[in-house]
Image (cartoon, grey):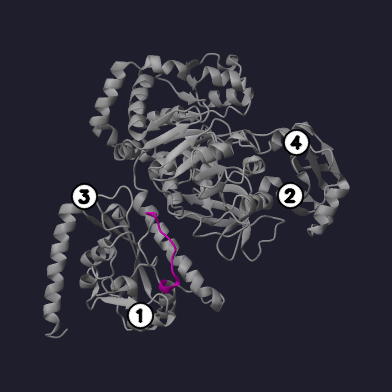
Amino acid sequence: MTIGDLPWMAYQEGMRLLFKVYFRLVHRIRIEGCERVPDSFNKLIVIANHASFLDGIIIWTYLRLPFKMVVDRTIAQKAWLRPFLKNRNIVPVDSMNPYSLKEIVRMVSLGTPLLVFPEGRRTSTGNIMKIYDGAGFVALKTGSAILPVYLTNTYDTLFARRHRGRRIFVPLTMTIGEVRQPMDLRLLPARERKRAATRAIYFMLCDLNVKVHAKPTTLGREFVRICKANGRRTAFSDSTGNRVTYRKALLGALALGWYLSRACPGNIAIMLPNLSATAVIFMSMQVHRRVAIFLNYSSGPSALVDAMDLADIDVVLTSRKFLERTRVPEAIFDRRKLVFIEDLRREVGWGLKARALFGFLFSGPFERMGESEEKETSCILFTSGSEGKPKGVCLSHENIVTNVYQGLSRVDVTRDDVFLNVLPMFHSFGLTVGTIIPLFAGAETFFHVSPLHFRIVPELAYAHDCTILLATNTFLNGYGRRGNPYDFRSMRYIFCGGEALTDTVFQRYAKVFGTRVMSGYGATECSPMISINSALFYEYGTAGAVLPGIDWKLAPVEGITNQGGRRGKLLVRGRSVMKGYLKNEVANRKYLVDDEGWYDTGDVVEVTEGGSLKIVGRLKRFAKVSGEMISLAAVEEVLVQELAGRGDLAVIAVSDEKRGERLLVVTDNPAIEARAVHEALKIRGFSDLAVPRQVRFMKNIPKLGSGKIDYVRLKGLV
C-alpha cells in the first residue's frame, strides 16, 4: 500500500458504509456464512448467481476481499453504469474475444482474488441460466480455489430485468458457501476439461441454491407464506371450470382444516381425482398439521382394503360421482366413515368462513413451527406395487420441501408458467412435481381428472396455454398419436417420469410438435426425484444428472459387468429420502440401521462420462438365463419400438428346467410372431440367450394407475 492508495481506500470505506445503510434500511439484508471466507489464500475465484445490478455491489460491500470484478465490456460502456463501473476494481472483458481472458489468468495467478458471474448476464427467469466457459477456463488455468456465493431475492428488486413482481422493499440474503478446492481434471482428455470445469461450477451454484432454500420448515407454513405473497394470482384450475386463487386456496384450506379437525378426528385418507378441491384438501391438512394419506384407487379393492388397514384409516374423503365412475364398491369401506366433497360446501358454514378470514389476516400461529417439526410425517403414499405388494411410504415435510428445491435448482419454473398435471396425486410424481413445485414457484396448475383421455389432454394444453406437461411415456405416446401438431405450441417443457422414455415418443414430439421431452428418474421413497434432464444439462438417452443434495453410490451386482465402476445397483442418501416405511420394522431396520440410511433403489444404472444416469433396468427385471444376466427392460424396449405399433407388449421371465429361466413375450397385438421378435433383437446385436422363443397373446394386459404394466399380476396370469 502506498500513500496514493489512501484516498482510494477512504473512498471505498465510505461507499461501503453508504451501501450498508441502504441495504439494511431498504432490503433488511442478512449475511450468512461470513466465517467461511478464507483469511488467507493463494489463488481464489468467487462465483455467484446473477439476477440484478445490485449483485456485485452486495458482494463487494460485505465480502471485504481485495478482488477484481469481471464485467462484460458492453455493459461497462453503458452511459448510466459508467460512473459505477469505471474504477480500479472493475476489469472489462470482451466476451466475444477468447484472448481477453489472458490478462485475467495472469492477475489470478499473481494472487489477486477474482469475482465472476459465470452466467455473464442477469437472469431473465429468476433461476441459474447458461454458464459460460470463461470461469471454468480461468479456474483450470490457474488452479484456483473457488468460493461460491448465492444471492436470494435480488431478482425481485427494481435492478433486475423487467418482469411482473418487481418491487422496492425486497428482503435480501447473501449466503457464502464452503471454499472448494482447486479442480483436478487431469484424468480427462484435454478437450473435455474446460467443459467439465464449467459443469462443475454450475453444480456448485445448484448445490448452494438448495442449501439456501431448503431450510427447516413445513409444507403448511410455506403454503401460508406463498398464498399471502401471491394473493389474487391463480393457483389451481381444473377441467370442471373451477378456478382457485392463492388467496381463496388459503381461505379454503383454513376453513376445511377446522371442519375436518372437528368432524373427523381420526386418520383421514384422500381418494379423489385430480381436481382443485383435492389440492386444497391436501394443503388444508398440511396447514392444520394432519397427515395426508392418499389411496391408490386404481390398485383394486383388495389393495385398497390392505392400505386402509395398514394406515388405520377412520375417514375416507371421496366423491359420490367419483365412486360411481371408478366402480369402487362402497362395501370395502365398512367400519369407516365416508365424507363426500359434494357435502362439504354445505357443511362449511359462515362461521368457519369468518374464522378462516381471521386466520388469513392473523396467520402467526400457522407460520410458527415446533422443534424438529419439519421431520414429522407430512403424507403417506403407497408404492405402485409393480414388483410386489405396495408399501406405505412416510414422507416428511423436510423430504418434500428439499426435493422441491432440488428440482427448482435445475429447472427454471416462473410465475408465468401453467402446469398441466394429469397424473393422480397418489402418485409421487403428480403430487410433488405436478402440485407442490408449481405452488412454490408461484405458478398455476391445471388439473385434469384422468391421464387416459388421449384426445382431451392435448386439447386442454392448447385451450389453456399450458407451458409444462408431466406424464409417463405411455401417456405421452397416446397424446402424441392423437394430438394436433399445434396443440403443444405453448409448451416450454415436457417431462417424462415413472418409466423409460422411448426413442419413438421422443422423436415424435421433436418432429411433429417441435418439443424436446425431458426424462427424469425417481422413486416414491425419494419424494420422488433423484435425477432429471433440463435445458441446461441434457444428455439424450439418459435420465439426467443426480440432483444436488443427494449422495449416491453404485453397488456391484453379480452377473453384471461393472464397466470400470460405472455400472451397478444405485443407492442414494439425503434429506429427500423418506423417513421410512409404515409399520415395516424389518425393511426400516435394513434401510436405517444396516444400510446406514442408504436407500436401495433396486435399479441397475450406468453413469455416463457426462455424469448422467442411464437406467439399465430394474434388478427384479433381470433374468438369469444359462448363468447370464439379461435385462428384460432392454429387450422389451427394443420390441416395443420395433413391433408393438399401437398395441402393448411386455417381456417376462418364466422358469426353465435347462436354462434356469427363459424369456416370454406377452402382447395384445396378434400380428406379432416369434420370428419377427428374433429378427428385431438380432439386428440390434442381442445374444441368443436374450431372444424370447415364445409369443403369447393376451387381450387385456393388466396395468397400474400410472399406465405401467402390472408385472406381478401379469406373471400370475401367465
Indicate the secondary structure of the residue bearing disc 1. helix
Q: Amino acid at mark 3?
A: Phe
Label whose residue precedes the other's in the sequence (2 or 1): 1
Q: Which dot marks residue 169?
A: 3
Q: Decide if residue 465 is on the left or right side of residue 675.
A: left
Q: CA distance from mark 4 to mark 1?
A: 64 Å
Can residue 595 be seen by looking at this rendering? Answer: no
Indicate the secondary structure of the residue bearing disc 4. helix
Image location (x, y in percent) of residue 510: 62, 53
Q: Which residue is mark 1?
A: 104
Q: Is residue 485 magenta?
A: no
Q: Of discs 4 and 1, which sits in the foreground?
A: 1
Image location (x, y in percent) of residue 263: 39, 16
Label whose residue precedes the other's in the sequence (2 or 4): 2
Note whether 325 is above or below 188 in the view shown. Answer: above
Q: CA distance from mark 3 to mark 2?
A: 55 Å
Predominant SS along the magenta part: loop
Q: Which residue is mark 4?
A: 715
Q: Amino acid at mark 2?
A: Gln
Q: Decide if residue 57 is on the left or right side of residue 239.
A: left
Q: CA distance from mark 4 to mark 3?
A: 62 Å
Image location (x, y in percent) of residue 525: 52, 42
Which image quarter holds the N terminus? bottom left
Residue neighbourhood size for the residue with mark 2, other residues' Cα within 10 Å, grouped as few (<14), some (14–19), many (≥20):
some
What residue is drawn where x is 33% and y is 15%? 349
Q: Amino acid at mark 4?
A: Lys
